[in-house]
Image: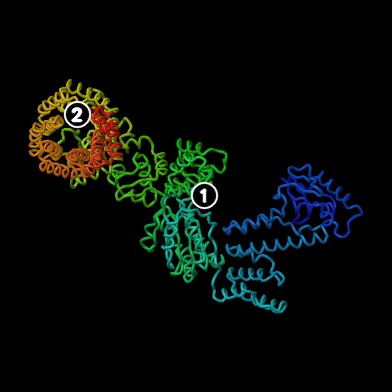
Amino acid sequence: MVELRVLGTVEVVAGGARLDVGHARQRDVLAVLLLDVGRAVPAGRLIDRVWGERPPRQPRNSLYAYVSRLRGLLGALDGVTIERERDGYVLVADPLTVDVHRFERLTRQAKATADDHAALALYDEALSLWRGTPLSELDSPWVADVRSELERKHDTAVLDRDDLRLRTGAHAAVLARPEPDVASGERAAAQRIEALFLDGRPADALREYEMVRSRLADELGADPGPRLRGLHQRILTGRGPEPRQLPAAAPAFSGRTGERAELDRMLAAEGAVAVISGAGGLGKTWLAVRWATDHASRFPDGQLYVDLRGFDPAHEPVPAEHAVRGFLSALGVAAASIPPDPDGQVALYRSLTARRRLLVVLDNARDTRHVTPLLPGGSACSVLITSRHELGGLLTTHGASALRLRTLDEEQARDLLAHKLGPARLAEEPEAAREILSQCGGMPLALAIVAARVTVQPSGRLSALAAELREGRLDALDTGELTASLRAVFDASCRALSPEAASAFRLLGVVPAEDIGRAAATALLGNARTLRVLCAASLLEEHLPGRFRMHDLVKLYAAELADPATRLTALTRLLDHYVSTAAAAMDLLSPDEPYLRPAVTGPRRSFTDVQAARAWLDAERPSMLALVTSAPKALADQVVQLSATLRRYLYVAAHHNEALTFHTTALALTRPGTHEWGFTTHAVAMTLTLLGRFDPASEYLEQALTLAVEHRNDLLESMTRSSMATIADIRGNRQEARVQLDLALAAARRTGHALLEGKALCNIGEHHRRRGNHAKAVEYLHRSGRIAEDLGSAGLGAPVLAALGSAYAGLGRREEADDHFRRALEVVRAGGNTNLEVTALNDLAATKSGREAISLYEKALELARRSGHLRERALAHHGLGVARRAVGDEPEARVHLEAALAAYGELRAPEVAEIRELLGVGLGM
């Protein structure tokens, strides 16, 4: 290591050894070059600075000789050399190896640093470079001027450091310095007087003030300046110093404007207490410090700040009594004057703050007990607290306001990343940038870690980082330092939990769905108490009443902590809960079809009515789907049970795509040839039929029918033949459809289930209606309707009403048709039967014309699109094409007819020919 020194004697030190740099004139040359390191110094200027008005006879030769010897001396050092440049010389070296340049850089950094303690450390380092009088062995007019300027900078740095010492409670160090005289200036005198006051010696401080005032009057004929007069007043009134403890605020970005405005509101009145809570990594400290810095002028008596380290990954929490002592010191209480007992310290702290307009920032608090001793006295001080805990006790007992910090939205997250990396960097790889933003989930710490990784590897591709995040997000969001690792941040939160809450946290991590209901969570955890605990700890969020979720990054961490055995046990409890509760819901939703559902034993939830049961099914459907698709094979029985239990609900509510996922997952876990396999195969086939995928549906139906016939399972046979008839009817194979329908009716009658017979009769009635035999249709539909009335079955009655509406319309009995359609729609909407609603809307629209028909078809099309029902979508497009053409809207008519042609083509339905003809007419063919 090379050190080039001028703050003392001119020296060159290499590896701890001082080199001989020659006599005084040669050291003069070296000093000139060191002070202008990196800049060329013309030879004439060198000569003038070294010799002044008494140069040697041949100054350039002498200068050359000195430079030559210095070049030889410095040439052996790494990174230091003297080079010739035009008519002068330049000493090439890192400026920070020259003590004077390092001193000036450190003092600049100290002045720019908002953190007083950090600035103090920089000043200490800068002043430690001084070894005495600068250029002490040299003597020339130029040296005298330089020395004077350097000493002025040294004295300024000492004074700046002493101001910091006074603000940070290090007034003893100020008193240890020699007493200043008048020549030292009022600032030094004021510092000593303030140090005496802070040391608990107000009488000495007043005597010192009088001495300074007298000397100023006697020697300079002047009165004390504003600082001395203000200090004198403070001593007389007993008021302590004005602490400025806020750490440096990170640069702002456009996000969190709403939260900052909310803090403005919460802290508008004097004496307000505001709590910013939220999960680790959301930027609570940034927000608090940013707000406090922006509003520092509102608190003329200063700002107190402490990092309580309540959830610090590397340190234990700071005890409240330790923080109180720090505040007392900052408020000017000498160490000897601080009461020994914690209660006395708190009392003194509150006395000192009772009439002062201070802002107290308590960062990273563990809980309410952690911050209560640090609340100031009186009503003049405002308090801003951050914590991962919601601090409900503080909100209750101290009237604090709460700001729950949440993740950034998509726009805010992009702004933050662009703020750190620059918009151009994101624009270079927009897809990768979008994926990174998605993987970070709006968490500011995750985005900051990503930005840091990109910054240290500026040539790296965002796409590579995106790929790394896909492979393992928590691994990718780790810089190797505890303060920049999501795992470390989450671990700090978990360490604060009780064993019961920590266990619940791990169990919730294995839930595959985005959220979980209270009842399901209770089944999973064994009780609901820990849900509240985890919400209070900001590890869980009740984002909707009774529904809870984790941030996906928190959930990944929780899942890592769960062992396989615990995971299986937890998922078993959860799936058992869904099976039993779904069975209870279906008993209300479809009470006349218990034979279609597996028997479920054990306690069941009680629903107040059908609406409550349907609401539960709607709310839990995504969770049940996520659980079924991720369940291990060990839970195959429960998966098959749940699929069978939900079959009618999924069909009626028209969740056809989700139904396909449910049933195909269950089928893969079912042993071929079994009763369960046959019914699950039929469920898959029925769902594929609704989605318009007739070919694979037919294959599954053939397998189900073979099993039904072999095992003489009349229930499965009737259901399967009815589904086969549906496909045949849609494709125009009327004779084949009628054969299957008659066989389905016969099988239904053999089961002894009247409802199944009623469905078979309704299907036959629909078959006759499609063939144009409306009178025959009415006959079968009335027979089906009587069964529905006898059973009180809305599930059968609604399709009968809708089919009768179409049949009466075909017979020209418009009023009866409209009445039946109206009644059918009332029933299906009350019962949430979306599958039948779309059919009824299409059939009703077919009986209308003009704008009325268009409106009904559009409603049907919306429902058909949402459910994936291809046949009904084709019918809606077909009807809209015809209706739009009828009102003269030919462009829209062609759009719908072409869509109908594509849908009918997928179905291989006979309507294809009709649509082609309609499109031909549109083209004028």
Residue 713 position, x and y percent, is 16, 25
Is residue 240 shown to the viewer in this render?
yes
Q: In the image, is residue 211 above or below residue 138?
A: below
Q: Which mark is residue 726?
A: 2
Q: Is residue 65 left or right of residue 791?
A: right
Q: Nearer the viewer, residue 42 or 441?
A: 42
For the view shown, which residue lies furthest in the front direction?
924
Q: In the image, is residue 61 above or below residue 744?
A: below
Q: Disc 2 vs disc 1: Cβ atoms closer than 8 Å?
A: no
Residue 599 position, x and y percent, is 19, 34
Q: Which mark is residue 437?
A: none
Q: Quarter of the image for the C terminus: give it.
A: top left
Q: Nearer the viewer, residue 497 or 734?
A: 734
Q: Amino acid at mark 1?
A: His
The residue indicated by pointer 1 is: 419
**Rounded to the nearest whole Å, what is the CA distance between mark 2 and mark 1?**
60 Å
Residue 63 position, x and y percent, is 86, 50
Q: Is residue 584 left or right of residue 264?
A: left
Q: Quarter of the image for the N terminus: give it.
A: top right
For the view shown, which residue lies furthest in the right direction?
57
Crowd band around label 2 with a 10 angstrom C-alpha radius: few (<14), some (14–19), many (20+):
many
Q: Amino acid at mark 2?
A: Thr
Q: Earlier in the sequence, mark 2 or mark 1?
A: 1
Q: Residue 725 appears in which quarter of the rendering?
A: top left
